[in-house]
Image: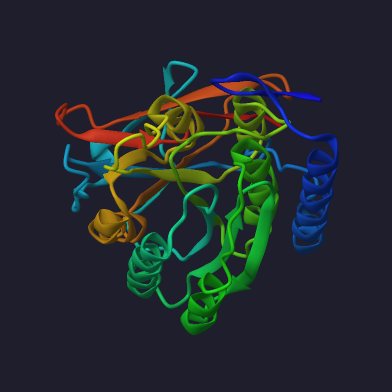
Amino acid sequence: MAHQILNGGDRQRPRPLRLAILAAALVGAFVAAAIASQAQTPPVFTGGVDLIKVAVTVTDREYRFIPGLRQEDFVVYDDGKPQQIATFSSERAPVSLGVLFDASRSMTAAKLASARAALTTFFNLLGPEDELFFAEFSEAMRLLQGWTTDRAVLQQAMLRVRGGAFTSLFDSMKEALRVAVSGKHTRKALLLITDGDDTFSIASAREVRSALSGYDVMVYALGVQEAAKGSPKVKEGTLRSLTDDTGGRTEVVSGYENLEETVKRLADELGQQYVLSYPPPAGPAKKWHDIKVEVPKQKQLIVRARKGYVSK
């Protein structure tokens, strides 16, 4: 039975193996759906009578956060028209953050140990009120730990990573998003650790991007590039297509042993974001609005924010 995959055309698998793997995928999907039972319908990002809230990250080109900016430093555009900023905050707000870890193919004990050490550092650098979930994926997503603020529980969950042969990145992303939106905090994020390859999903990258447009979830991706000869190249373009429109970003990391320094920067970034809001422009419901945020007097800075929302 042929199965269509990204960057590779059709791949033949024995029917019994395929059926067994699909059964495992259905079990994984059922578990994620049960955890996110209150989040089955993607919420429309703030619109209608509510203020449009936008989380904004401002960094230099080394991903170092730029503090001390004021409301008057920002200009926000909605469908190309400048808007009056109604509220502005630079205070840290707690985050509901999911971690989706690629455990497919050649995940060795040494790589897992490096990843666990880096993620333990990452968890401990986040705020005490931040809640997290941890999931692995190969043929399907496995939720190893639901929402918790207990870092020791998360460390135990990482010990249960078991991996698999194939990579269901896009299907797993869709399941993880359903869990992510069930977090209790207004600010929500998803961290993906992978090389960006997909060899098994039914869903496509386009379907994931479409799903993301209905969620207010920042997506970050750390693409781990192995140095060993024959190691697959990180699909950086694929990862950027999943992260950049959400206000998150993609960073390529050279080997799991260098993951720790990268997650330190990410923890710092998540701890320092600006949040601004503005009244929604008049117009029809269910319309997509482009958002653009600028710091016009400091053109050298990198300003990242969600690229848009759907009005109610």
Residue 282 shows in the view: no
The C terminus lies in quadrant:
top right
Q: Locate residue 204, reporting x and y percent.
A: 65, 26
Q: Is 166 located above or below residue 7 in the figure? A: below
The one of 272 and 281 positioned closer to us in this rendering = 272
On the picture, is 14 further left or further right than 166? right
Residue under the point 47% across and 50% down: 106
Residue 264: name its quadrant: bottom left
**Residue 104 screen position, x and y as percent:** 55, 49
* Quarter occupied by the N terminus: top right
The image shows residue 305 at horizontal and vertical percentages of 41, 36
The answer to whether residue 290 shows anywhere in this view is yes
Q: Residue 249: name its quadrant.
A: top left
Residue 283: x, y in percent? 66, 19
Horizontal placement of 69 versus 243: left or right?
left
Colouring of the image:
rainbow
Q: Quadrant of residue 262?
A: bottom left
Count of all numbered marks drawn on residues in the image: 0
Is 199 or 156 nearer to us in this picture? 199
Question: On the rendered structure, is 136 left or right of 175?
Answer: left
Foreground residue, 157 or 69?
157
Residue at (54% x, 20% y) in the render = 7
The residue under the point 69% across, 49% down is 140
